[in-house]
Amino acid sequence: MNKLLFSLLTVLLFSNVLAQNSRLETKLLQTQTLTDKVFKGFDGLGNEYFVKNNVFIKQSETETWEYKNVALGKISAVDIINPLKIVLFYEDFNTVILLDNQLNEIQKLNLFDIDNTIFASKIGMASQNQFWIYNALTQQIMLFDYLKNTSKNIGNPIQENIKFTQSDFNHFYWIDEVNNWYSIDIFGKVTLLANIPPFENLQIIDAQTLLFVKDNVLYCLSTKTKSVFEIQIVEKSLPNFYFKDQILAIFTDQQLKKYKIKLP
């Protein structure tokens, strides 16, 4: 089945189920007030991560840690999939900072100093002491070994414009301008996963599941069951959300709510 036919079939499928979707129930667990902090997620130990005035903050029930680097400007992205090696990306300076679990700086990498052809626009933690990098100059996905300071291209350059990216240890995901959802693994295998409905915000859970917001409604899409489920929450608007370990966080710059939910 070619890509065009696959896209047409999947978009028709998900458009139909979006109009007639089942619902997933949630249970409110916690509500807290945020004071000018941008919520970035939480880890498996319950620690929460924020950015406030360009300072990166980790907060437990009893302790708070902070990291700031004024010289590098704005924090462009945060990756906390490995809470023992947290990644901060400062795109304006093409620089990656690696932090330990107490936000001590382990490593600082100016990618221009290592290879002046790398203009990173996306960074994420990969396996085997590597970062995923999307090189905006070459439109190439790369794996960068941060212990050896070496890089290698993975797969072919991406020809389509990219509107969303996300990564985990073993995959780099992207969604192009016509909503085709792709993945590439650390060996360079590219897979077209689905053509998804239009969205305003999105989080990829794994290669078969994602959450997305459309018209202020939160949905769960499963390619395994070929279904879209509406997630029941009381919020009238959904500027931001984050899911991990059956906990769904809905947040603004004023408030954070956590719900218990089981995805299909």
Image: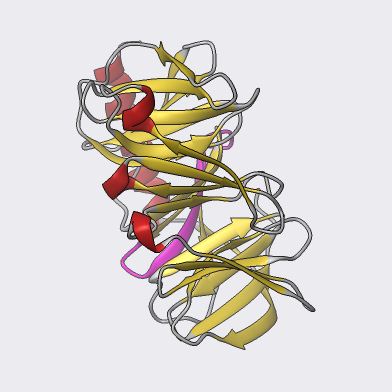
Residue 163 visible in rendering: yes
- The dominant secondary structure in magenta is strand
Foreground pick, 207 / 127: 127
State the image quarter where residue 164 is shown.
top left
Q: Residue at x 57, y 35 (%)?
A: 168
- The colour scheme applied to this rendered structure is secondary structure
| Residue 248 spot, x, y in % from top left | 61, 65
Could you tell me which quadrant the N terminus lies in? top left
Foreground pick, 251 / 236: 251
Residue 181 visible in rendering: no
Foreground pick, 84 / 108: 108
Q: Is residue 119 above or below residue 23?
A: above
Q: Is residue 92 above or below residue 33?
A: above
State the image quarter where residue 59 is shown.
bottom right
Q: Is residue 254 above or below residue 181?
A: below
| Residue 194 spot, x, y in % from top left | 40, 31
Q: Verify whether residue 216 appears in magenta.
A: yes
Q: Residue at x 47, y 29 (%)?
A: 132
Question: Which residues are the magenta region?
Answer: 214-228
Foreground pick, 200 / 194: 200
| Residue 68 spot, x, y in % from top left | 49, 64
| Residue 260 spot, x, y in % from top left | 70, 68
Q: Is residue 22 above or below residue 221?
A: below
Q: Residue at x 22, y 36 (%)?
A: 178
Q: Is residue 246 left or right of residue 211?
A: right
Q: Verify whether residue 200 appears in magenta.
A: no
Labels in figure, total: 0
